[in-house]
Image (cartoon, helix red, strand yellow):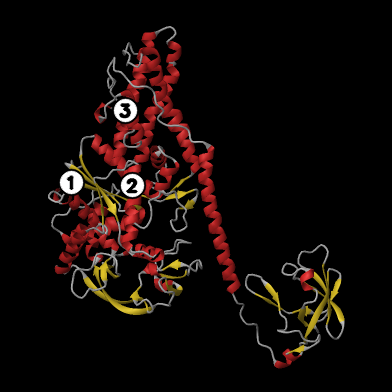
Amino acid sequence: MKNYKRTLVTAALPYANGPVHIGHLAGVYVPADIYVRYLRMRGREVLFVCGSDEHGVPITIKARQQGCSPQDIVDKYNNIISESFKGFGINFDVYGRTSSKIHEETASEFFKKLYDEGKFVTKTSEQYFDPEANTFLADRYIVGTCPKCGNPDAYGDQCEKCGSTLSPEELINPRSKLSGAQPIKKETTHWYLPLQDYEQWLREWILEGHKEWRSNVYGQVKSWLDGGLQPRAVTRDLDWGVPVPVEGAEGKVLYVWFDAPIGYISNTKQLLPNDWEKWWKSEDTKLVHFIGKDNIVFHCIVFPSMLKAYGDGFILPDNVPSNEFLNLEGDKISTSRGWAVWANEYLEDFPGKQDVLRYVLTANAPETKDNDFSWKDFQTRNNSELVAIFGNFVNRAVVLTHKYFDGKVPALGELQDIDKGVLAEIPALRESLEKNLEGYRFREALKDAMGIARVGNKYISDTEPWKVAKTDMARTGTILNVCLQICADLAIAFEPFTPFAARKLRDMIGSPLEWDLLGRTDILPEGHQIGEAQLLFDKIDDEAIQRQLDRLAAIRAQKEAEAAAAAAAEAAAHVEPQKPEITFDQFEAMDIRTATVLEAERVPKTDKLLKLTIDTGIDKRVIVSGIAQFYTPEQMVGKQICILANLAPRTIKGIESKGMILMARQGDGKMRILAPEEVLINGAQIG
């Protein structure tokens, strides 16, 4: 393994069309922050780069929906997102924006160099065009019926109901999201990056050179390469984005997938205009991309191919630790359905509990497979682990030190076997912790850190210094000295995971933040004055959790009601196919007449049947009809109807029914009586 002088860590640029949610935090930003904090504690030179991804179709769609400009949208969400990161202690060295001038200059220069060197190919194709809005339509601007599940509002690139990946050509009855018009096909020319030219190089670099990458990343890359790479468009017809910097490209911008990763470079330039190249063009720099699994292809195939095509010494990622997806209460997180826990709202609902969410998301991180977040698990982990183990141990150690030694670290006397055993466990846990952090196994690393807390909590419970103090104060001092050294270990070990609690603990006991001290028995010297005990964590009650569950239940109920309404509307619009044709003579055989209802009553022991006594103009007769769910007896009395008079009698529930009422039935089962436009004499023939 190569020894690098510095590490460049990038976190996927969050899309600035909405706040970040727990899926984003668990998938990218908390793990990246854990890694960066750890490296800095080891004294390594690190640069942590991120920023808002502010171009692309969803932003223009949201701007149209809200009647504002795309810039208004990205300004709003850039602020919300960046403040959320700060709230969770995720502090980037630079948090840039792809709508900035320096990014436009960098991305334009990148495209222009590849263009001038003939690295692109041009292709003319037919794409969907809105004849009313007079503009080409990106995939997300086209909606229609999903061919897989029948969802009438599937997008041109994906159906959010069934999750299928689609193309606009697959949609049934496609329509423009801008005007509602039916799109037409129109020719347009774009530039493409011929990814197939880099396929063999990618195979050698990744499949042969990086078998240590996570299986989900390696496997997805292999699948793409085995399927054969195709040219990928780097421009598109749109009025929001980085303008394509060549003649004849009016109305075209850089495709967001090409534009966005260059943001890592432009953001570094923004921070270090004179020194950025040592981070991007030096073999002494280790580049690590933290991303979600939906970005694997872009960071492992597309962006490296772009850098390879550009040349000029750009380094490639040493690793791309990508997480899978986090679900919420057993259901896929969906921003369009509002099925999410938003970072900014969490900070408002649970003030001072940033560490709790960081801890739970790490403990339940979807590192190799999709995982689930539940509010009950969140509560349990806080109350049973952070409060009952970590917090409880620290509180007892500090309180007892103040009680018996006036808050001064007591002397470490003769060690017994139990003391030696506990102190021997910490270096072993540190070694495992380091290996897991270096290997991007943050869930396992958190178990190691919590393992130190478990060791301490068990030790203080087993040794019972509050009982020993009654007879042996020297022994009590030794026990509490060991406990306080473990507290100092915890302040170091938990810094990457729960930085707010770690700082609070360090301030409480006055311990240093030096990784190399972790596991030593003399972090806090004898006689060192510690502060008063403060709770690191407090319990989360059932009421707070129920509020979150109720909010999700309301969202689910609303969406189910909307889905039911949509299904009902679709069913209502369904028209049965025409029945086999009949002859005129067959039609003539039906005697359809007007009649008036004289009496009406429900048929006992049934829900649907009404017994109607009618005047046909020929006679008075009884008809039994299954219309009770649509009409009450009171509504039927006096109503003129149309009947098939010469239908053979039939006995229903012991009542002879002579004839049938003519009714219209639609797809959802709704029925309505057919009646003359104006009152006619009873017995008037229809036909």
Residue beneath disc 1: 285
Q: CA distance from mark 2 to mark 1?
A: 29 Å
657 versus 270 height, above or below: below
Amino acid under label 1? Thr
Residue beneath disc 2: 83
Query: Reading the chain from its start, which is encountered first: label 1 or label 3?
Result: 1
Q: Can residue 429 be seen?
A: no
Viewer-nearest of discs 3 and 2: 2
474 versus 119 height, above or below: above
Query: How many labels were placed on the picture?
Result: 3
Amino acid under label 2? Glu
Residue 506 — which label?
Answer: 3
What element does badge 2 sit on?
helix
Give left or right: position of 345 versus 671. left
Out of 91 and 300, give the one closest to the viewer. Answer: 91
What element does badge 1 sit on?
strand
Which quarter shows the C terminus?
Answer: bottom right
